[in-house]
Amino acid sequence: MWVKSLPCLINSQDCNGLIAAHHLIKPWDGSRGMGMKANDRNAIPLCQYHHTILHDTLGAEFSLFLRYGLSELTGMIVAEKLWIKSPHNPDNADFDDNDPF
Protein backbone atom coordinates (compact mmCIF):
# COMPACT_ATOMS: atom_id res chain seq x y z
CA MET A 1 0.00 0.00 0.00
CA TRP A 2 1.23 3.46 -0.92
CA VAL A 3 0.65 4.93 2.58
CA LYS A 4 3.30 2.59 4.03
CA SER A 5 5.92 4.24 1.80
CA LEU A 6 5.38 7.62 3.49
CA PRO A 7 7.05 8.94 6.66
CA CYS A 8 5.33 8.65 10.04
CA LEU A 9 2.70 11.34 10.41
CA ILE A 10 3.89 12.16 13.94
CA ASN A 11 7.42 12.82 12.66
CA SER A 12 9.10 13.06 16.06
CA GLN A 13 12.46 12.00 17.45
CA ASP A 14 10.91 8.90 18.99
CA CYS A 15 9.72 7.48 15.64
CA ASN A 16 10.89 3.90 15.41
CA GLY A 17 10.13 0.87 13.29
CA LEU A 18 8.48 0.17 9.99
CA ILE A 19 5.62 2.32 8.78
CA ALA A 20 2.13 0.87 9.12
CA ALA A 21 -1.02 2.08 7.39
CA HIS A 22 -3.20 2.91 10.39
CA HIS A 23 -6.88 2.80 9.48
CA LEU A 24 -8.65 5.57 11.34
CA ILE A 25 -10.94 4.71 14.19
CA LYS A 26 -12.80 7.95 13.39
CA PRO A 27 -12.80 8.11 9.55
CA TRP A 28 -13.26 11.34 7.61
CA ASP A 29 -15.77 9.93 5.11
CA GLY A 30 -18.41 8.31 7.23
CA SER A 31 -18.30 5.82 10.02
CA ARG A 32 -17.19 2.30 10.64
CA GLY A 33 -19.08 -0.37 12.45
CA MET A 34 -18.03 -2.37 15.47
CA GLY A 35 -15.14 -4.63 14.53
CA MET A 36 -14.93 -3.21 11.01
CA LYS A 37 -11.75 -1.77 9.55
CA ALA A 38 -12.02 1.63 7.86
CA ASN A 39 -11.42 1.53 4.13
CA ASP A 40 -8.13 2.60 2.54
CA ARG A 41 -9.44 6.13 2.07
CA ASN A 42 -8.97 6.47 5.81
CA ALA A 43 -5.37 5.37 6.28
CA ILE A 44 -2.48 7.38 7.69
CA PRO A 45 1.19 6.41 8.03
CA LEU A 46 2.42 5.69 11.55
CA CYS A 47 5.71 4.14 12.57
CA GLN A 48 5.54 0.97 14.63
CA TYR A 49 6.24 2.89 17.84
CA HIS A 50 3.41 5.42 17.39
CA HIS A 51 1.00 2.78 16.10
CA THR A 52 1.65 0.67 19.20
CA ILE A 53 1.31 3.68 21.54
CA LEU A 54 -2.00 4.56 19.93
CA HIS A 55 -3.51 1.10 20.29
CA ASP A 56 -1.90 -0.19 23.49
CA THR A 57 -1.55 2.92 25.63
CA LEU A 58 -3.74 5.79 24.44
CA GLY A 59 -6.56 3.97 22.69
CA ALA A 60 -7.67 7.03 20.73
CA GLU A 61 -6.23 8.86 17.77
CA PHE A 62 -7.20 12.21 19.26
CA SER A 63 -5.04 11.48 22.31
CA LEU A 64 -2.04 10.60 20.15
CA PHE A 65 -2.31 13.78 18.10
CA LEU A 66 -2.80 16.01 21.14
CA ARG A 67 0.19 14.37 22.85
CA TYR A 68 2.38 15.60 19.98
CA GLY A 69 0.85 19.08 19.74
CA LEU A 70 -1.34 18.34 16.73
CA SER A 71 -5.01 19.06 16.20
CA GLU A 72 -7.52 16.39 17.18
CA LEU A 73 -8.60 16.41 13.54
CA THR A 74 -5.12 15.75 12.15
CA GLY A 75 -5.81 12.13 11.23
CA MET A 76 -8.99 12.93 9.33
CA ILE A 77 -7.45 15.91 7.52
CA VAL A 78 -4.31 14.00 6.50
CA ALA A 79 -6.20 10.85 5.49
CA GLU A 80 -8.43 12.86 3.18
CA LYS A 81 -5.44 14.68 1.64
CA LEU A 82 -3.62 11.40 1.16
CA TRP A 83 -6.63 9.82 -0.53
CA ILE A 84 -6.90 12.78 -2.90
CA LYS A 85 -3.21 12.35 -3.81
CA SER A 86 -3.18 8.55 -3.76
CA PRO A 87 -2.19 6.67 -6.89
CA HIS A 88 -4.97 4.22 -5.90
CA ASN A 89 -7.67 6.87 -6.15
CA PRO A 90 -9.42 6.39 -9.51
CA ASP A 91 -10.30 10.11 -9.60
CA ASN A 92 -6.66 11.18 -9.22
CA ALA A 93 -5.30 12.20 -12.61
CA ASP A 94 -2.08 13.98 -11.64
CA PHE A 95 -0.21 12.51 -8.71
CA ASP A 96 2.97 14.58 -8.78
CA ASP A 97 3.35 16.14 -5.34
CA ASN A 98 6.49 15.55 -3.28
CA ASP A 99 4.80 16.64 -0.05
CA PRO A 100 2.30 13.91 0.88
CA PHE A 101 0.85 15.83 3.85
Image (cartoon, rainbow, N blue to C red):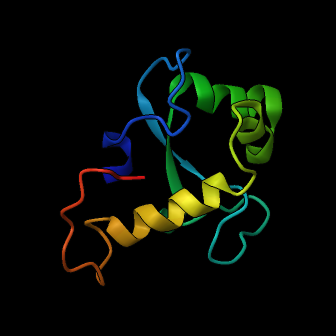
Q: Residue at x 64, y 70 (%)?
A: 28
- Left or right: residue 25 compared with residue 12: right
Res 66 quadrant in image: top right
Res 96 quadrant in image: bottom left
- Left or right: residue 15 compared with residue 27: left
Q: Is residue 51 something that shows in the picture?
A: yes
Q: Is residue 96 above or below residue 13?
A: below
Closest to the observer, 3 or 95: 95
At which x and y percent is residue 1?
33, 51
Q: Is residue 37 something that shows in the picture?
A: no
At which x and y percent is residue 49?
58, 21
Q: Is residue 12 above or below residue 28?
A: above
Q: Is residue 101 above or below residue 57?
A: below
- Left or right: residue 63 compared with residue 49: right
Q: Residue at x 51, y 55 (%)?
A: 43
- Left or right: residue 58 compared with residue 55: right
> Which residue reaches farthest bottom?
91
Closest to the observer, 93 or 34: 93
Q: Residue at x 76, y 27 (%)?
A: 56
Closest to the observer, 15 or 57: 15
At which x and y percent is residue 21?
47, 45
